[in-house]
């Protein structure tokens, strides 16, 4: 694509662009500090302005309020990250896999495979399940009995799906994900832990992506559910009977305890913990490293422990000063 | 089982049950909000009373103090969760696996397999180990040299046991568990990290269950030990030379640093961290998201950071009011 | 080695050693509480002095200031842990593997294998990569396309390397490690999460060790880099575009969010979280369970939330006493 085409494609405005530069062609995007004079790069936050000024990129994408501080040839757009996403999808389309079922894959006779499914080396699919069109299952995947997987999914190496899981369309499970392991349920009797059977399923709806080494337990009775378009990062713990709505975001190392409910569009930052049986309502946000011990109202932002600490330090300082004034006052009057 | 038999089996008392209802038969338990008029359900905590009132379940199990608020036919029992456990075990007995050793399992000649062992596809068992009666090893499991596994264990897919591990009877290891990886031991010399060899073993005693993607490091010298009937959740880190007693509970995403000791019946909630070389004595409880930096006495409950924060906020507020009073006082007297 | 040789080897000083004891031979080191009269043991910290006094070890290694409190035969050295490391390396040298490529390993024709490479059962190496001399790849490993691995590496069972990873020499990846999974990048548009393609690589330099079930995401554009001699513990999350310098230490369950930079010799203790785009400069230390929300200067020690809490509790107590004094004062004067 030449510069003129890029500007049209992004519906942006040119800035610092000489006439002959419009014909120049680009096909790669790189970060500000790694871009060369053959690359496009982008700036979306003021804090990288100094890095941008020094960038060797031939063409920058930037929002109007930052563009004016730069002398590079650039394309002004309101939402630079969305513009970059469009270019990335155009320039680096995922290569469609050539469907192939490895000779070493072990697939039970009762499993129904749709057209153009791929199954990698040494993967195992047990009885009675099904796999939808164009789904790719990489190597060393274990799929238990009666597991149904939709179309256009990507199941990476080493994923384990326990029996009876139900996976929608266009779901991505990264390497090491475990779905359907037993929930953590025990009763104490005379100093011993008795296991409560975990008999429910896991249901993962369409367009969910789950990061590496994350674990999702099955329900005890009833199901664990992850709603459409929800995205979960690496090393997250989803306990039994959790119900997650649509288009939620859950960042790395967070944990949702048993029977937690997230409504739609909830955002959970990294290393958050949510106590069992809590409900977090639509659009609420939980900042990083925060423990959630009571229900969270819709669209609210939970106060982080970090902010509470900082607030208290401020109050302590103000009280200290007040005490000093009072003491001085008392001395003066005595 | 009909209602009369259920009441007998649970040693409960009938309530709101008409004569002809005693003959009605049930065979499924479902959660309050998912139960139909063919299901039994249960209530154990007051907070679900409203959900229980609306439940379509045909028969409820509930404790006396909650039963009186409900109009459903029900069985009163003192410990409803224990009653449900009894019914679950009766109605949903685990199906005994048909012992089978997959043709693709690679088992060294020197390994001793007892009667009725199952080994799944593509699992590998290296030299000199042994596997006890009726143990089930699923697919893609790696078992190193000289690993001894007891009877009636269930080793799920993708588990990795390093060399020299010792696993008791009736142990359950969920998918992705790693046992025996090197402890994290380095010495710094002239700005570089030198690895300390990790030469110890891991010993897991009878009736232990370990959740998905949890890791247990081997001892440096000496062993890492997990005591009988201890239950560990998903994504937990057990460092080198940790000694865990009997019947402990360790919930998700917690971490025990090197040489931590837990005595018997310790309960560790989720996302807890315990510093190296700490001892937590018998029956102590560590609440969720708490850091443990000093030894914990027997049967005590560690104060959570959350409670400490809340307590301080209360003290700050009381001091603020006192300051206000004093200031007013001073003004009045001046 | 006899005692005389041990003393020479460690350049230590004898203490409480009778003439005939110099000829006694030892070949095993065990912890203080597990050592027998055939073992050497060691003491490096005063807190284990009482354990040391009761130890049955025949010979102790200890620093001068602790040695004087012990009656065991012993070797005084300034750095007992370094001395033990030397003995461990001498007495327990790792047995060099007999190079062997399992008949069940699936290795693409275009992969270049150097001399003396080992590949375990059911491992898969896809097109165009290379593996250096004497590298050991255990069972069930998945190595994607165009992955280059240096010499003398040890890749444990169940590791997954996505396409295009670059691994240096003498790298150890423990079981369940995932390298190169997609970074967690989404843009929100009309309430839905749109995936940002993750196109970068992961570069792991020489002599890095990564613990069990840790995940390292690929860069979005540009690369995620882990510098030479850096050591990472179990269950750690390294997000996209993180840059880690040389000889860093990152302990268990910690998480570095996107585009975090660690310079050389940074120490991150357990369960730490570092916010995206933060830089931690050379030699800085982050204590356990600390959230890092702003850049950290060189050689500084970040104040832990724990210490901040304790400090505030102290200030509250001092203010309470001051308030009491003032109130008493006011009463007396009124």
Image: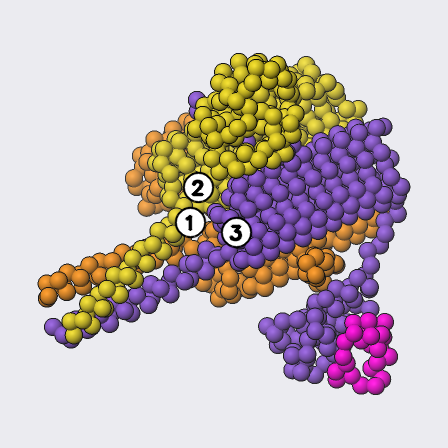
Chain colours: A yellow, B orange, C purple
Q: Position of residue A304 (x, y in %)?
A: 41, 46
Chain for disc number 1 = A
Q: Position of residue C268 (x, y in %)?
A: 58, 53
Looking at this view, name the residue that lies furthest to the bottom: C19
Label 3 to label 2, Cα distance in Å?
A: 21 Å
Query: So how many labels did they put on this image?
Result: 3
Magenta-colored stretch includes residue C121 = no
Chain for disc number 2 = A
Q: Nearer the viewer, mark 1 or mark 3?
A: 3
B105 vs B182, nearest the viewer: B182
Chain for disc number 3 = C
Residue under pointer 3: C296
Q: Which mark is residue A306?
A: 1
For the point 75% across and 84% down, the residue is: C16
Q: Is residue A218 left or right of residue B32?
A: right
> Please, what secondary structure does the residue beneath circle 3 have?
loop
Residue C50, quarter of the rendered image: bottom right
> Please, what secondary structure does the residue beneath circle 2 have?
loop
Magenta-colored stretch includes residue C2 = yes
């Amino acid at each position: 694509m030449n510069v003129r085409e890029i500007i049209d494609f992004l519906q942006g405005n040119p800035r610092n662009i000489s006439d002959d530069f419009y014909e120049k062609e680009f096909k790669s995007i790189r970060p500000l500090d790694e871009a060369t004079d053959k690359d496009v790069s982008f700036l979306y936050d003021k804090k990288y302005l100094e890095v941008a000024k020094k960038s060797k990129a031939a063409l920058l994408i930037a929002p109007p309020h930052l563009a004016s501080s730069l002398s590079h040839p650039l394309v002004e757009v309101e939402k630079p990250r969305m513009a970059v996403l469009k270019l990335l999808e155009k320039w680096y389309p995922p290569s469609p896999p050539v469907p192939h079922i490895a000779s070493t894959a072990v697939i039970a006779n009762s499993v129904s495979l749709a057209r153009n499914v791929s199954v990698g080396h040494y993967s195992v699919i047990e009885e009675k399940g099904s796999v939808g069109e164009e789904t790719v299952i990489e190597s060393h995947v274990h799929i238990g009995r009666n597991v149904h997987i939709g179309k256009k999914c990507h199941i990476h190496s080493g994923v384990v799906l326990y029996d009876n899981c139900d996976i929608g369309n266009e779901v991505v499970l990264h390497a090491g994900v475990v779905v359907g392991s037993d929930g953590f349920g025990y009763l104490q009797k005379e100093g011993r832990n008795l296991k409560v059977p975990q008999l429910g399923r896991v249901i993962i709806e369409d367009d969910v992506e789950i990061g590496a080494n994350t674990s999702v337990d099955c329900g005890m009775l009833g199901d664990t559910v992850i709603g459409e378009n929800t995205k979960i990062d690496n090393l997250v713990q989803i306990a039994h009977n959790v119900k997650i709505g649509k288009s939620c975001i859950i960042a790395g190392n967070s944990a949702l305890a048993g029977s937690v409910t997230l409504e739609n569009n909830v955002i959970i930052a990294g290393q958050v913990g949510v106590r069992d049986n809590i409900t977090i309502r639509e659009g609420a946000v939980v900042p990083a490293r925060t423990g959630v011990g009571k229900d969270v109202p819709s669209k609210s932002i939970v106060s982080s422990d970090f902010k509470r600490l900082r607030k208290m330090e401020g109050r302590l300082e103000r009280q200290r000063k007040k005490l000093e004034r009072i003491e001085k006052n008392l001395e003066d009057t005595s």
